[in-house]
Image: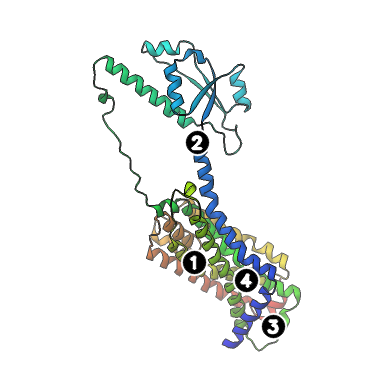
Amino acid sequence: MLNRMINIWRKELMDSTRDRRALRQSILIPIIIGAFYAVFNPILASSISARAQDPVSIPVQGIENVGQDFIQLLGQFDITLEPYDGDLEAAVASGDQEAGLIIPAGFSSSIESEQPASLTLLMNQTAGGPMGGSFSTERLNLAIKTYNEQVAVARVQQRDFDPSLLTPINLDARDLASPEQLAGRFAALMLPILVGVIVVQGGLFIAIDVTAGEKERGTLEALLVTPASDIEVLIGKLAAVFTLSGVPLVLTFLGFWLGSNLLPDSISNGAVLPFSIVIVAVLVGLPLTLFIDMILMIVSVRTKAFKDAQSAATPVIFGCMIPGFAAAFIPPTSVAAHIIPIYGAAAVVGGMATSGGVVNPTAILLSVTGSLIGAAIAFVIALRFFNRERLLYSA
């Protein structure tokens, strides 16, 4: 019995790996996907952060109404006021300008006479494309807040009061995040999504090929005339699918780890992603892969053609991706939630990335248990479909 299952496993592996181009893709593409997921978010965040620090030029109407002290303070924040001729409000509304500042007459005199003074900031959030432009409202607010504090301190000093009266509380903020936690900040978002994507994509085509693909090519009959029983055929094919889908899983997470740790310090700020995250991702991912492979084979064996199986597997793809997205944005509030297949595995990986590599043994155990229970149930269901009549004639 064991020899027959091993022979079927070897036969399916040989058939699936005979195409050298497909074999190269199955090895290279997971590494590229993992590295892409690891690199994309930090680079995007670094680009946004760098853009937020770039010098800002704001078109202004009424610049003659403001004093040089205010202009110089804005310059300390790399904010330059540029006089604007024309209808500034219309220019901002049309998107020709990202923002504009209107300084009313009497602005400086109101400050000197200790009367309230106001500025009008015009903005258009759609200007600058989907990622926004270079204008930073936060930086302008910080500059004005600093100017307000300077003016308030000057007024207090004129009245012979202690300026410290204006700041009864000083906040000493310290970031205690470790380099591993900093590296896991983006991994906590991407890894759960990656779990949901790779477990279904890794085994999709091989699961279809050993079922509906063999039906379409007419090669299934040759296998069914062998002494192998129906359960031996199922186990042999499942072993082949699991073997070939497990390799992309390992390579994808390895590529993610390599991509994360090969980023230059200017992007990663010296943060290092622990390799233990990759180990845990593979540990919880392999049982989940077995479960998803079973589901894919059940769906595929009920069709007669490769394209039909691809269409039938579409709900499975979304059924795997959605829990991965959910785990990335909605972490479990109870450790018991980790027993939910897909969601639990994705949540384990995301939680470990957030903690900088700290392992929660209970969460890992529950995740693996949930996947194995799901695989066992799916195996029982698969036995109903993997008999000679259904394999040959079901559609």
Name the image quarter holding residue 356: bottom left
Alpha-carbon distance for marks 3 and 4?
Answer: 17 Å
* Relative to 193, 9 lies left or right: right
Q: Residue 225: x percent and y percent?
A: 70, 86
Numbered tag placed on residue 282 in the rendering: 1
Type of colouring: rainbow
Amino acid type for the residue under numbered disc 3: Leu
Q: Residue 324: x percent and y percent?
A: 52, 57
Amino acid type for the residue under numbered disc 4: Met
Alpha-carbon distance for marks 1 and 3?
Answer: 33 Å
Q: Are marks 2 and 1 in contact (CB under 8 Å)?
A: no
Number of marks drawn = 4
Circle 4 packing at 10 Å, graded few (<14), some (14-19), many (20+), is many
Quick check: 78 above or below 254? above
Numbered tag placed on residue 223 in the rendering: 3
Numbered tag placed on residue 297 in the rendering: 4
Q: Are marks 1 and 3 in contact (CB under 8 Å)?
A: no
Sequence-wise, the earlier of marks 4 and 1 is: 1
- The residue that mark 2 highlights is 52
Quick check: 136 above or below 325? above
Alpha-carbon distance for marks 4 and 1?
Answer: 22 Å
Circle 1 packing at 10 Å, graded few (<14), some (14-19), many (20+), is many
Amino acid type for the residue under numbered disc 1: Val
Q: Secondary structure at mark 2?
A: helix
Q: Nearer the viewer, residue 150 or 339?
A: 150
Q: Secondary structure at mark 1?
A: helix
